Amino acid sequence: KEKFNRCRTEYLIEVAALRDAQQQRVNLDEVIRKTGGGGGHMALFEPLEALHPEEKDYALRAVQEKLKMILEHDSCGNLTMNQEQLHSLGKMQSEEELNELKKNKQELEEALAKLEERCQNIKLGNAANQADNADKVHELRTENQAL
């Protein structure tokens, strides 16, 4: 697992460096410095703190890379947002939700099939009981007439 985490991190570093070299990309440190580093609100929960140390480094690099993909400079050098990249984040979430819904649908369909089978068995059992009861009623009537 350690080898995989190291390999994954090194790959991300290399891809980010290649993208930086190929495109005029945003320098996140510069953006943070120019904007003052945040909105001044208090955040008590830091999601990255929930990760193991070996996962945290990769997650930080992945977030930085995604931010570089979202934030870009236009032809005049103004900082803009790449709407396609923002849309891709929403699409990933939608796909995950859709897969979860498909899984839930499958489970519900299986449960429904089992219930339908049980209902059918109960109907068959009731039909058999009715036939037995009809036979018993006929026997009792026959005995009653004989008396």
Image (cartoon, helix red, strand yellow):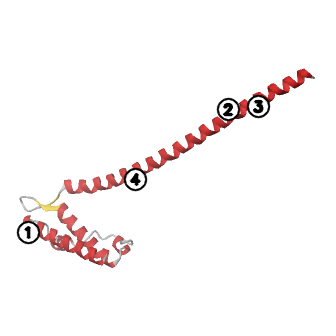
- Foreground tag (1 vs 2): 2
Q: In the current view of this chain or complex, which residue is farthest to the top?
A: 145
Decide if residue 60 is on the left or right side of residue 100.
left
Rounded to the nearest angstrom, the CA distance separating label 3 from label 4 is: 49 Å
Mark 3 Cα within 10 Å, few/some/many (few <14, many 20+)?
A: few
How far apart are labels 4 and 1 at the CA level?
39 Å
Q: Residue at position x 17%, y 57% from top?
A: 82
Rendered location of residue 134, percent (x, y): 76, 28
Sequence-earlier tag: 1 or 2:
1
First along the sequence among labels 3 and 4:
4
Residue at position x 13%, y 71% from top?
17
Residue at point 16%, 69% (across, down): 16
- Whichever of labels 3 and 1 marks the residue nearer the N terminus, that label is 1
Q: Secondary structure at mark 1?
A: helix
> Which residue is disc 3 drawn over?
133
Which residue position holds label 2? 127
Query: Could you tell me which secondary element the residue under label 2 belongs to?
Result: helix
Q: Nearer the viewer, residue 56 or 40?
A: 56
The foreground one among 35 and 111 is 111
Circle 1 is placed at which residue position?
21
- Horizontally, residue 44 falls left or right of residue 145, namely left
Q: Upstream in the sequence, badge 4 or badge 1?
A: 1
Vertical placement of residue 83 versus 3, above or below: above
Circle 4: element type: helix
